[in-house]
Amino acid sequence: MSTLEESGEERLIGKLFRPIAKHWGALGLKDDAALLTPLTGHDLVLTVDAIVEGVHFFPDDAADLVARKALRVNLSDLAAKGAEPAGALLSLAVSDSASEQWLESFARGLGEDCSQFHCPLLGGDTTRTPGPVTISITAFGAVPTGGMVRRDGGRAGDAIVVTGTIGDSALGLLLRRERIRPGFANLSRANREHLTDRYLLPRPRTALAQALRDNASAAIDISDGLVGDVGKLAAVSGLSARIDARRVPLSAAALAVVTAEPAQLQTVLTGGDDYEIVAAVPHNRLARFEAQAGEAGLALTTIGRMEEGEGVEVTGRDGKPLSLPRASFSHF
Ligand SMILES: [Mg+2]
């Protein structure tokens, strides 16, 4: 198997990345820079996120899934801002021992997701590193001028609404790390696969962008845990938030884990990597928001509301206030 060292960056780019960089502005990856023409009457929305081997993915995770995750965490940020994807830049650092097979799989996964999410690869850079594989993607999105959904627009009385189900990815990570936990002991194979899949492959809610622009006063995608990320949204909006854990939507798999091991509710609420969207929505926009999300094929659940004050109060599944030692995941 040839390695990155032997193959050389030019050959690698030509063989693996040029075929997936089909947008005219990528200039066939033959230039020092790429071009992106902003849509008239729109703002460009910019975001960057890196994922690191051993931190965000396991060394033996399939390379195509690693590539998809790297792109999708950025698409999730764009979606939460109400932005439509416009393009992405890739920075990939791999070790000398990276096999060509790994790189081929990586490029294939990335190319398929760039097509699926209409987010063309515009350019990139590959380097060797003595450290863990590190993938940084910068994504560009577009919103009508002034239309980006910010974190700080929440208002007292707004409903707190989430997409999808919460906690699957964090439980999937735990399942991968500690198979012997009581919550997983009697979990069906289908439920195990569901949790693992949600850890490996985020589902960015790009289809919600328009509904968010039309209806939400503030939004954030859940990367570091529901409670922590709602807390961030509330804090920058100058408000507090109340969350009712009984209303937090759980998949059948997550419900089975929490039923078998109630302490895992904390993992669900604070574990992170959900890549669902949580939005603050005024009550008079709620019905329309739900209708538009439904048309986009997304389920929404109201889990609480924004109030005056500060901090996040969570009501537990027993109806009593829940104290969480740790609101969210932090790398630092
Ligand atoms: Mg985010």
Image (tube, rainbow, N blue to C red):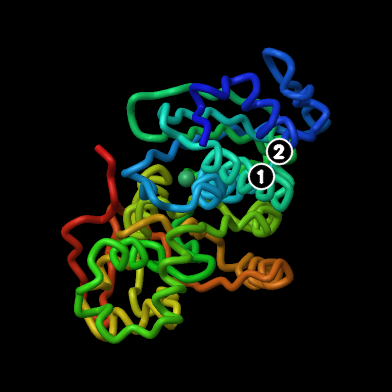
Mark 2 element type: strand
Mark 1 element type: loop
Q: Nearer the viewer, residue 22 or 274?
A: 22
Residue 45, image quadrant: top right
Q: Residue furthest top?
A: 32
Residue name at image x 66 percent, y 53 percent: 209
Residue name at image x 27 percent, y 72 percent: 265
Residue name at image x 29 percent, y 50 percent: 329
Q: Position of residue 323 (x, y in %)?
A: 18, 66
Q: How many marks?
A: 2
Q: Nearer the viewer, residue 230 or 124?
A: 124
* Label placed on residue 83: 1
Q: Position of residue 21 (x, y in %)?
A: 73, 33
Q: CA distance from mark 2 to mark 1?
A: 5 Å
Mark 1 is on which residue type? Ala
Residue 128, image quadrant: top left
Relative vertical location of residue 279 with respect to residue 188 in this rendering, above or below:
above
Relative vertical location of residue 230 with respect to residue 43 in this rendering, above or below:
below
Quadrant of image for the C terminus: top left
Crowd band around label 1 with a 10 angstrom C-alpha radius: few (<14), some (14–19), many (20+): many
- Residue that carries the numbered disc 2 in the rendered image: 142
Residue name at image x 44 percent, y 54 percent: 222
Residue 285, image quadrant: bottom right
Mark 2 is on which residue type? Ala
Q: Nearer the viewer, residue 297 or 146?
A: 297
Q: Nearer the viewer, residue 64 or 212?
A: 64
Q: Position of residue 71 (x, y in %)?
A: 57, 44
Q: Is residue 81 visible?
A: no
Which of disc 1 and disc 2 is earlier in sequence? 1
